[in-house]
Image: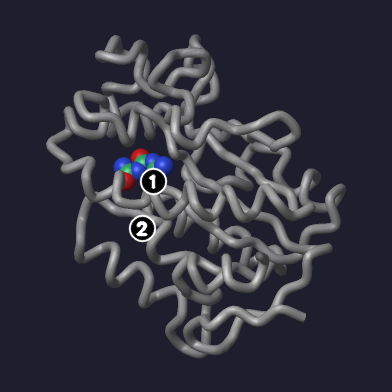
Amino acid sequence: MPAVDARPTPFTFDLDTTALLVIDMQRDFLLPGGFGESLGNDVARLRRTIGPLGELLDAWRATTMPIIHTREGHKPDLSDCPPAKLKRGPMIGQEGRFGRILIQGEYGHDIIDELQPRDGEIVIDKPGKGAFYATGMSEKLEELNVRRLVVTGVTTEVCVHTTVREANDRGYECLVLADCVGSYFPEFQQVGLQMIAAQGGIFGWVADSPAVIKEIQ
Ligand code: TIU
């Protein structure tokens, strides 16, 4: 079994039960001039993940292991957006530079050009921060016989953390890749990663992508 050099212990996995999860690498969060930046965030802190994630995808695509992309967003009528979320995110559904913000079908809602899903890869749309809530994620992972997730995407402390916590409670083993997850806040990036691997790996493991690429090439 391949073993990735990870914290707090090596992460062992096999090619039959492991999937790559790419969370919310959407234009609304990552493009200069987009929604994320309009909130005062420095998108460079997220964009540093694009290069390493592209290299990881290249290596992963040469294997038979599944790739699952997620996108956070809502139906055009916002019927799947809880009023409490809209109250604290009043820009959701408003016209932004890249279309209606976080609305399915809009340019800004889709995945950045560099990391566009390829044919055969799975795309899961989710209304919440976690990838399991109100989606077909559990059923899809069952169908694919996946038990372990290599987790990448944005943002570390929001959608990545929520998804890893959801996955953890459902019995999945998660390896989070530090160079392939990003936060607008450097302190959240640091502490968010520490929280995953603390207490003997309370939520999972943390490593960098070259350690995974080395094991799957
Ligand atoms: N994908 C994701 O993390 N959604 C967010 O709203 N993140 C923030 O950091 N705001």
- The secondary element bearing badge 2 is classed as helix
Percent x, y of residue 104:
51, 18
Q: Is residue 12 above or below residue 193?
A: below
Q: Is residue 143 above or below residue 25?
A: below
At x 73%, y 39%, the residue is: 136
Percent x, y of residue 189:
29, 63
The residue tagged 1 is 50
Percent x, y of residue 44:
21, 45
**Residue, far left:** 40
Q: Is residue 31 above or below residue 175?
A: above
| Quadrant in which the N terminus is drawn | bottom right
- The secondary element bearing badge 1 is classed as helix
68 or 172, nearer to the observer: 68
Tag shown at residue 157: 2
Which quarter is ligand 1 in? Answer: top left
Percent x, y of residue 76:
49, 11
Callout 2 crowding tier (Cα within 10 Å): few <14, some 14–19, many ≥20 = many
Q: Earlier in the sequence, mark 1 or mark 2?
A: 1
Tag shown at residue 140: none
At x 36%, y 58%, the residue is: 157
Q: CA distance from mark 1 to mark 2?
A: 18 Å
151 or 81, nearer to the observer: 151
